Image (spheres, rainbow, N blue to C red):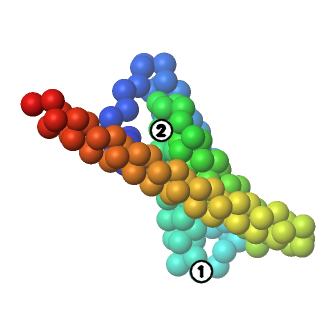
Amino acid sequence: MITKFKGIKFGTFLGTYLIVVFIVNTYLLYQLYTVLDDIITSPTEVLFFGLRSVTLIVLAFFSFAVYLNADTKSSILYLVMALCFIFSEVLFYIRNYYIYDWSLVLVERLLYGCGLVFLFYYMVTKNKAKKRALKIRSYNFVFNKHKK
């Protein structure tokens, strides 16, 4: 997705909107980090929480930016996959550090599984698009060669 992100041209409104969303998410993550820092006794676990959460925020930022730039089937699948992983992670932390309920475990695992399914369909869609583009390029090459 990083190659798609390089070619994105944002307007000032859309760029500002993405920056504000990123800042709000980072602030909420920081607030959650301060709460969990008091609850979690191991500093290594807190570090891994921070790394996992920052990675998920970056994943969501990229997927949202690509979706806003190009409203395609693959960008929608990528965005929904990122959202499933993020909500699954939030439920994981709620379940581990606040309330343990079997229904939270069920919803968390379902969201994670759905995220994996969306990742699979995203990869299938991207590979089909690449094959289609390669086939079109080969047809154009043969057509242009015959033309000469």
Task: Give the quarter of the figure containing the C terminus.
Answer: top left
Query: What is the distance, in whole Å, between disc 1 and disc 2 at their CAs?
Result: 37 Å
Q: How many marks?
A: 2
Amino acid found under the numbered disc labelled 1 = Ser
Pinpoint residue 124: horizontal percent, then vertical percent: 52, 56
Q: Which residue is mark 2?
A: 66
Q: Residue at x 47, y 30 (%)?
A: 69
Q: Residue at x 22, y 35 (%)?
A: 143
In this view, 67 is above or below 102? above
- Classify residue 9 by image quadrant: top left
Image position of 36 (left or right of 62)? right
Q: Which residue is mark 1?
A: 42
Name the one closer to the observer, 48 or 34: 48
Tell whether label 2 touches label 1 (CB within 8 Å): no
Q: Secondary structure at mark 2?
A: helix
Image position of 32 (left or right of 11)? right
Q: Residue at x 56, y 49 (%)?
A: 78
Observer able to see residue 26: no
How busy is the neighbourhood of tag 1: few (under 14 within 10 Å), some, or many (20 plus)?
few
Q: Nearer the viewer, mark 1 or mark 2?
A: 2
Pinpoint residue 1: horizontal percent, then vertical percent: 41, 49
Q: Residue at x 48, y 19 (%)?
A: 13
